[in-house]
Image (spheres, rainbow, N blue to C red):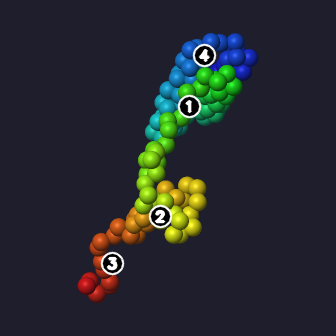
Amino acid sequence: MAKVKEIRDMADEQIRLVWKDAAETLFRLRIQAQTEKLAAPTEMKKHRRTIARCQTILSQRGTLAPAAPVATVGGADGDPRHEKHAKKHGLTGRAKLKVPGKEGVAARRTFKKRTQSGT
């Protein structure tokens, strides 16, 4: 496990390699923890912290890859149906992107609930 000073002295590519190695090791440890008892359970914590250190230093340098952009429902042009719905129901912000008629699993159910009599 690398200390903060050691990581700060590394180049960006080296930090990314340390990050990748720690992530792979953490993945293997998580699988091993599910199948058998770990010899050193604190290793998982150490690798998580190493990953966090790498991400923090890269973000401080401004070289951390940005997250993938989130696609909006209405697209960039702004669907007028969504605007009309938002205005009608007084929605603002993210709630404007909610598509009418998509209330969730309960609204999509098409089967009847059975009673104890079987009908």
Q: Choose mark 3 or mark 1, whichever is in front.
A: 1
Mark sitting earlier along the chain (2/4): 4
Q: Where, by quadrant of the figure, is residue 119 drawn?
A: bottom left
Where disc 4 sits, the SS reads helix
Give the label, 3 or 4, closer to the camera: 4
Q: In which quarter of the view is residue 100 placed?
A: bottom left
Looking at the image, which residue is at 32% across and 84% down? 116
Residue located beneath label 3 in the image: 113
Q: Nearer the viewer, mark 4 or mark 1?
A: 1
Residue at left offset 55%, top offset 55%? 94
Q: Residues within 10 Å of mark 3 (few under 14, many from 20)?
A: few
Is residue 57 rendered to the left or right of residue 13?
Answer: right
Q: Which residue is mark 2?
A: 84
Rounded to the nearest whole Å, what is the CA distance between mark 4 and mark 1? 15 Å
Q: Secondary structure at mark 3?
A: loop
Residue 81 appears in the figure: yes
Residue wearing tag 4: 12
- In x, y percent, where is residue 1? 64, 21
Whether tag 3 and tag 1 are in contact, CB under 8 A, the answer is: no
Which residue in the structure is indicated by mark 1?
A: 66
- Circle 3: residue type: Lys
The label nearer to you, 2 versus 4, is 2
Q: Earlier in the sequence, mark 3 or mark 4?
A: 4
